[in-house]
């Protein structure tokens, strides 16, 4: 059976962690070890933050190198024989064309959708002084450009929260993914509002992880993102 490559793209607070976690529970290799509890490859997440100087979103590494790293990463994951391999990170929103070049045109793209103002408000409610309008707006614009006319599966945040079972079924159908009943139930439970794993309950996702905040900045602050459900 041919292996399937999966990219989960979405701005911060769009439900991408919920989708990535559900895929993990369904048996997709999402690239562990993970960055904290957010079902995104720790190693590749570190690379992405270097490439785009998060949260300033300034390109620091050229496309040719980004493509090489992404290609090497997916081949290493596939070498163990997993049929479904995926990656999730908000900064992948800036890497759509990189992924097509590195992973091929048959890559299955999942876009996690949430109204821009809602995602900005969600960041504000974290109590952190981040420029949510710039951060979310820049990522959203990149996603709109990339997905214009491109086949993909759109997962709406509201639908994910209101009917997780239906959205899990849509994911499985889109990816031609098979899973037993126990895995499916685990995926649904993971998404259900309030069902947080121990790791996620204790840790937050970080913007600018590993950077010391400069004078007058707060970019080293924790962004507490728990499967997009801490509302």
Image: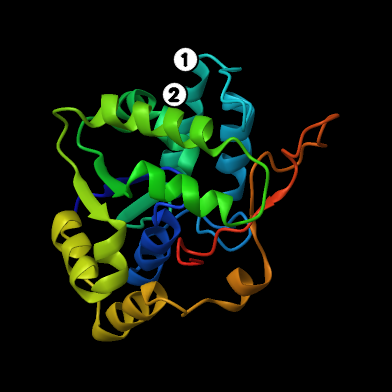
Query: Mark on residue 73?
Result: none
Task: Note whether residue 222 is visible.
Answer: yes
Callout 2 crowding tier (Cα within 10 Å): few <14, some 14–19, many ≥20: some
Provide residue 17's location: percent of width, then percent of height: 45, 58
The residue that label 1 is drawn on is: 64
Marker count (numbered) = 2
Q: Residue at x 20, y 64 (%)?
A: 172
Outermost right residue: 215
Q: For mark 2, what is the residue?
A: 67
Image: 209 above or below 71: below
Residue 78 visible, this angle: no
Foreground residue, 15 or 84?
Answer: 15
Tell me the distance, in whole angstroms, between the alpha carbons under discs 2 and 1: 5 Å
Residue at image x 46%, y 52%? Answer: 13
153 displayed left or right of 212? left
Horizontal placement of 115 versus 167: left or right?
right
Q: Is residue 158 left or right of 75 when viewed as pictured?
A: left
Residue 144 occupies which quadrant of the picture? top left
- Label 1 sits on a secondary structure element that is helix
Q: Is there a contact, CB below 8 Å, between mark 2 and mark 1?
A: yes
């Amino acid at each position: 059976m041919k292996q399937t490559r999966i990219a989960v793209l979405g701005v911060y607070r769009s439900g991408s962690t919920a989708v990535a976690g559900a895929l993990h529970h369904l048996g997709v290799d999402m690239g562990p070890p993970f960055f904290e509890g957010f079902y995104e490859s720790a190693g590749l997440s570190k690379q992405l933050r270097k490439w785009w100087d998060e949260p300033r979103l300034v390109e620091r590494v050229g496309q040719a190198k980004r493509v090489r790293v992404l290609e090497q990463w997916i081949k290493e994951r596939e070498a163990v024989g997993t049929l479904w391999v995926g990656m999730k990170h908000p900064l992948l929103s800036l890497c759509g064309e990189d992924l097509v070049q590195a992973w091929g045109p048959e890559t299955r793209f999942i876009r996690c959708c949430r109204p821009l103002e809602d995602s900005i408000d969600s960041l504000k409610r974290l109590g952190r002084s981040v420029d949510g309008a710039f951060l979310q707006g820049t990522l959203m614009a990149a996603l709109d450009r990339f997905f214009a006319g491109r086949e993909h599966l759109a997962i709406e945040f509201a639908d994910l929260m209101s009917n997780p079972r239906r959205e899990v079924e849509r994911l499985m159908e889109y990816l031609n993914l098979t899973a037993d009943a126990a895995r499916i139930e685990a995926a649904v439970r993971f998404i259900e509002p309030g069902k947080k794993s121990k790791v996620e309950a204790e840790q937050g996702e970080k913007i600018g992880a590993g950077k010391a905040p400069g004078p007058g900045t707060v970019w080293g602050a924790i962004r507490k993102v728990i499967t997009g459900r801490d509302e």
